[in-house]
Image (cartoon, rainbow, N blue to C red):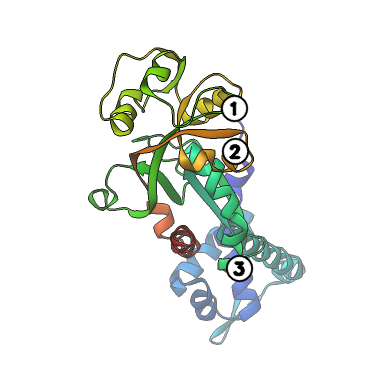
Amino acid sequence: MSRSLLRDLPLRELLALEASLRLGSLARAADELSVTPSAISHRIRQLERTLGIALLARRGRGVAPTAAAAACQHELSALVAEFRRATHALRHNAQQTLHIDVTPVLGATWLTAQLAALRQALDLPRLQVELSATRLPNAPADPRTDILIELVADPLASGLTRLFGARIGAYVDARSPLSSPVSLGELQQQTLLRQTVVEWSDWCVTAFGHSAPLHYGVMLDDPLSALEACLAGGGPALLSTLSVAPYVASGQLRPLHPAQIDAGHYAITLTERGQRKELARRAAAALVALAVA
């Protein structure tokens, strides 16, 4: 098996040597690298044994480079400085990036529209947001996620922060001949689009005080698929009021009835990773403020 170059590269030893050469003192090098002087001495001895040459000579309370060390000191210092600049850039970029895991409807209809306002609120015009709009109930979070936004029954019981309530209404393609408000009898004659998490019978009880046998059409796994099918003229659908708002405003969809049912609450929380990240904490607070606004 071939040996890894990175595994054989003595980074800690080279950093100890560079600091000792630049500062002329093991104690000062130890202070800069936040280790003990004996650790610095041990690392340099390890490097000397690996290379088979002496690198430092004692000069009173300090150290001086041998001829071999002096010959490469400038190049070594330049490489260490470049390494530090690259590390700083990586850290800076990581602090300028947020990974948000959100439900499909909220990600597609609300959060994407808030990104410009979020950058402005945080005063970070170059903020990078990695958005995963695939959040499902009780699904494990991606290890990279900083902020979770999901649909829950009771945010307080879950220890989450509420953004706003989720409502479901009945909508249809604007070209449909169905009346508004629709009657229960009319719905019984229609091919209805159904999501796995929403029941037409529950909405009918809210709208008409009771339900009746209904003819279901296509059952869809997610709300965005139901929205697309409704826009395509597939039939009446129970949809999130958030998801349909732009389509109602543009005249593509219309409500069949003013009745709506409560579908829980959209809530936000920080992951363990996000709790350690100041940017994530600030972003979560800004999103709560945007939701209130």
Mark 2 against mark 3, which lies toward the viewer? Answer: 2
Q: Name which of mark 1 and mark 3 comes first in the sequence.
A: 3
* 194 on left or right of 61: left
Q: Would you identify the image quadrant in which residue 199 lies?
A: top left
Q: Which mark is residue 231?
A: 1
Give the amino acid type for the residue marked by disc 1 in the picture.
Answer: Leu
Mark 2 — residue?
A: 247
Look at 64% across and 55% down and name the residue there: 51
Circles 1 and 2: CB atoms closer than 8 Å: yes
At label 3, counting other C-alpha atoms closer than 10 Å, the crowd grade (few under 14, some 14-19, many 20 or more) is many
Label 1, label 2: how far apart the Cα atoms are: 9 Å
Percent of width and height locating residue 156 = 25, 53
In this view, the residue in front, 166 or 43, is 166
The amino acid on which the numbered mark 2 sits, given as a three-letter code, is Tyr
Return the disc, 1 or 2, that comes first in the chain's sequence: 1
The residue under label 3 is: 17
Q: Which of 263 and 213 is in front in this view?
A: 213
User: Is residue 18 shown left or right of residue 242?
Assistant: right
Mark 1 and mark 3: Cα distance apart in space? 68 Å
